[in-house]
Image: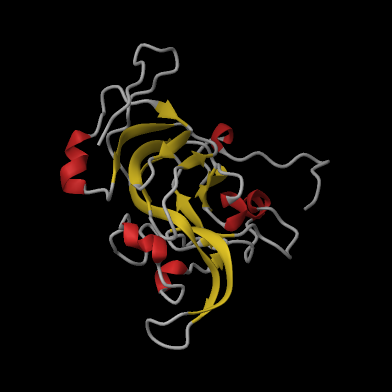
């Protein structure tokens, strides 16, 4: 485990929020695109193109409805996305086991369904995320970017995150503030932010190929109590999708 520090005397420093409302554990990495499930615990690959995922959900932008995520949020249009992005991965396993680089394509761990799922956050809630790299088909350094927010980097390390070991070492005094975190190869990072910016905000890997492969999700941050904390209407000349 290692910790980078920030400049607490800087003009834009914000103290770390201490009360956490939402805890998330997000695994991410590379997998395969499609399979069918002919029986319990089995998966037959139909298309072995590479895919990517977060918490075993491979993100795709909405298609066919003619609405963006933000427009669907503003107009309360159903059917464009769902609000069930999971707080944890569906499977617990040794996330950074080197043998996963040679995972059998029939293993369910190699496949993630395509979806357009978001996680809904109350306005001004505090979110803590453990970002856990996986070794499926190989480990990489993934720069994870959160749109719309800066976050505090509380800790980083190699291997699997262990709350009982790593949480007592969190840096609450002078952590760095960023909007992108380079999660270590075969490692993890813990970030915390306050959801005080309403709207739809994409979270994704900044490697050029990984975003279209599906290494992404989105936050739906609800409107706040005032006009200044509410998503404004789109301009009259907004281009259509």
Q: Is residue 33 visible?
A: yes
> In the picture shown, does residue 105 fall above or below 210?
below
Q: Please identify the quarter of the rendering in which residue 92 is found.
A: bottom left
Image position of 72 (left or right of 214): right
x 41%, y 82%: residue: 42
x 37%, y 25%: residue: 176
Quarter that holds the N terminus: top left
x, y (%) of residue 60?
Answer: 61, 59
x, y (%) of residue 227?
Answer: 58, 35
Q: Nearer the viewer, residue 141 or 82?
A: 141
x, y (%) of residue 127?
Answer: 37, 43
Q: Nearer the viewer, residue 97 or 117?
A: 97
Q: Is residue 224 visible?
A: no
> In the picture shown, does residue 178 fall above or below 166?
above
x, y (%) of residue 222?
Answer: 51, 47
Q: Residue furthest right?
A: 237
Q: Nearer the viewer, residue 22 or 212?
A: 212
Q: Please identify the quarter of the rendering in which residue 157 is found.
A: top left
Image position of 199 (left or right of 93): right
How many marks can you see? 0
x 59%, y 61%: residue: 81
Q: Please identify the quarter of the rendering in which residue 48 is found.
A: bottom right
x 21%, y 41%: residue: 167
Figure colour scheme: secondary structure
């Amino acid at each position: 485990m290692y910790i980078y520090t920030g400049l607490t005397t800087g003009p834009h420093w914000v103290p770390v929020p201490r009360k956490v409302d939402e805890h998330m554990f997000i695994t991410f990495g590379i997998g395969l695109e499609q399979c069918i499930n002919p029986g319990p615990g089995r998966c037959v690959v139909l298309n072995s193109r590479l895919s990517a995922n977060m918490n075993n959900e491979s993100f795709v932008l909405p298609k066919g409805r003619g609405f963006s995520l933000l427009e669907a949020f503003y107009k309360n249009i159903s059917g464009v996305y769902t609000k069930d992005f999971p707080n944890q991965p569906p499977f617990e396993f040794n996330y950074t086991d080197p043998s996963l680089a040679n995972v059998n394509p029939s293993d369910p761990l190699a496949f993630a369904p395509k979806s357009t799922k978001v996680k809904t956050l109350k306005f001004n809630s505090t979110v803590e995320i453990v970002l856990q790299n996986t070794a499926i088909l190989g480990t990489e350094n993934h720069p994870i970017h959160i749109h719309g927010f800066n976050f505090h980097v509380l800790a980083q390390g190699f291997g699997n995150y262990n709350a009982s070991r790593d949480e007592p070492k969190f840096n609450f005094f002078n952590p760095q503030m960023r909007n992108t975190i380079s999660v270590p190869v075969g490692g993890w990072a813990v970030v915390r932010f306050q959801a005080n910016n309403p709207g739809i905000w994409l979270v994704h890997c900044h490697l050029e190929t990984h975003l279209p492969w599906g290494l992404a999700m989105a936050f739906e941050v609800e409107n706040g109590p005032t006009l200044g904390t509410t998503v404004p209407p789109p301009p009259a000349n907004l281009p259509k999708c």
